[in-house]
Image (spheres, rainbow, N blue to C red):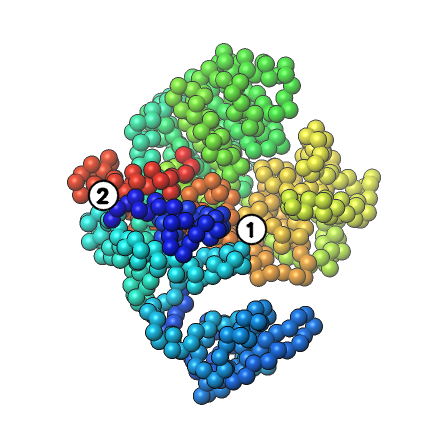
Amino acid sequence: MNPSILQTPIDYLKGVGPSRATLLRSELGIHTYQDLINLFPNRYLDKTQYYKINQLQRNSAEVQIIGKIINLKTVEQKRGKRLVAKFMDETGTIELVWFRGHKWIRENLKLNTSYVIFGKTKYYNGFNMPHPDMELLAEHEKNLRTAMQPIYPSTEKLSNKGITNRVMSKMMQQLFIETKVRFYDTLSQEIINDLKLISKSEAVFNVHFPKSQELLSKAQYRLKFEELFYIQLQLITKKLIRKHKIKGFPFTEVGAYFNDFYKNHLPFELTNAQKRVIKEIRNDIGSSAQMNRLLQGDVGSGKTIVGLMTMLLAIDNGFQACLMAPTAILANQHYMGIKELTKDLDINIKLLMGSSKVKERREIHEELENGTLHILIGTHAVLEDKVQFKNLGLAIIDEQHRFGVAQRAKLWHKNTYPPHILVMTATPIPRTLAMSLYGDLDISVIDELPPGRKAIKTVHRYDSNRLKVFKFITEEIQKGRQVYVVYPLIQESEAMDYKDLMDGYESIARSFPAPEYQISIVHGKMKPADKEYEMDRFVKGETQIMVATTVIEVGVNVPNASVMIIESAERFGLSQLHQLRGRVGRGAEQSFCILMTSFKLSADSKTRLETMVRTNDGFDIAEVDLKLRGPGDIMGTQQSGVLNLKIADIVRDNDILKTARYYAMKILKEDPSLSLEKNKVLLYTYQQLAKHKNIWNYIS
Ligand code: ADP
Ligand code: MG
């Protein structure tokens, strides 16, 4: 094969032309022949089967029937006309229905002539098939038939402009015939033999023109494996480079700060999971390689203390540390909490936020540069170029989903060597996803909650039960507890959402009148100072109810709050619901989460609500979430390559992913630079892929 032919602009393909090319580019990102070849079918229709009309069943997939049209009539209805044909085979009749394109059909359809029709049937006073695919039986028999007909990804605009699936298939045929594309094999003979894979050329051909179900499966396996294999190869290479080449600062000492804190000031016994994770971290930072570790732990699992103890190790070794949080509220909470925990240690800790005063900033900059500031806690403000450390050895990022790749990279340049990095996240990332997203990170998991926590009881209630819910709140408040009421805030409908929030607030204020009850309200449109004031009143227990939008989602810690009411819960995603619920259940009391919804619920909403009621386990929830939404919508995947996968699916192809990872590791272990003769093809392909930037925009 001449690889350059694949880089030919799509305009040059016979039958494409400038206007179609423009559409292909804008709608599907197809610029070159290669891009078209990489447009893999979403699914396939089985065209080997023919149905008789008396075999039709309700709710079946697409069917293919041979028969004749015996009459055609236009039916007037309230909303426009429809064209109805009676279609008959030797076992019965069904109706074919068209809502558009009547003229063309009337002029072209032949009565009493054999057709093969294809489509999905509906049942309403008998079977009918809206907008069937039709082909004259005579034509049908002449055509080259592939058993499985590929259905290509498309958009509304494409089909409106006449680029139907049939046109797409034609273009694909044209490409394969015109260019006689052959592919050099992109995997080594060793892998091909081991896994009994079919060749690249055979795979690409059969994925577009499957000769049989069996070959199609083999083709898909081969291409999915290859795609996942090269991603893993890249992620693992990166990790190896980091481990071997990127020097870090070895924190060899376990010194006075750490020991003093551990022996004298730790307010509780660490859980086994916390101890294990601290050990994992110590192993990393004690070596001379840079640590790049993701710490996952459900809300309330106690990640902060692990972070703090890691920072103490940094200080013990003469380094500075910083802790970054995504919101001012959370940064402030970390600051207060860590100040309190370390009040008997001689440590200088400061808080830097966007709102910090000039004088404060100047002081912070100065102390960072002369080394007298040990720990800097803050928001994105920490990343500013003006913020220079004397000797930054450790950076901790809390709730990393909110921080992009570029921001993480900025931290790397705040010292001569990159500091050790610990990323803490409360959104459990399913293992499946973690492997492909963060394959270059090491992962620690706190999978155990501190003792004495009672599992949060979660229920689902309809809006019509609001009075009962209010009664329940009243009882909890009388026991001295506090309550969150959270409203959705979704950008597009902001004005509406604010109205919901304010209406809700007023209704609560009527049911819980001052002075007996005090209510805080916090939302994104408030000035930071007002937000802080309201939060603060709730934290201090001066208010019993906190009405808020999701600004409280992340990190807020009020152990006395025992009830979380989520309004319009059907509008939240699973991970968000789980995060919100994590705001309660932080104290010793039994906590509750009440999911309020209207009666109208989609199937997905129902699954989300049921999942929340069923389990408190974040990993379990994350797996359900991943299945419901696919990886594309999971937070944090946007900037990663999983979205750009051409054929593999992180969820469904998990087994292939594991195999791919196994082979990538095995090969790199034996031949880290891929310089052995047998791996030459791997190195070449890897470099080609890097050149055309298909999959290399991964998190680093
Ligand atoms: P998260 O992992 O959500 O950040 P935090 O670090 O905020 O959790 O911890 C939640 C609460 O649990 C805090 O009040 C913290 O002091 C407490 N906590 C953490 N570890 C333990 C432990 N081992 N035993 C008892 N309480 C703990
Ligand atoms: Mg936290």
- Mark 1 sits on what residue? 574
Q: Quadrant of residue 104?
A: bottom right
- Mark 2 sits on what residue? 681
Q: Position of residue 195 (x, y in %)?
A: 24, 55
Left or right of 430? Residue 519 is right
Q: Nearer the viewer, mark 2 or mark 1?
A: 2
Figure quadrant, ligand 1: top right
Residue 35 seen anywhere in this rendered image of the structure: no
- In this rendered view, identify the residue nearer to me: 698 or 450: 698
Q: Say the numbered circle drawn on residue 171.
A: none
The residue lying at 51 percent from left, 44 percent from top is 635
Q: Is residue 398 above or below residue 108?
A: above
* Total labels drawn: 2
Left or right of 130? Residue 562 is right
Callout 1 secondary element: helix
Between the C-alphas of marks 2 and 1, the distance is: 43 Å
- In this rendered view, identify the residue nearer to me: 52 or 139: 139
Q: Quadrant of residue 236?
A: top left
Q: Is residue 436 above or below residue 95?
A: above
Left or right of 543? Residue 446 is left
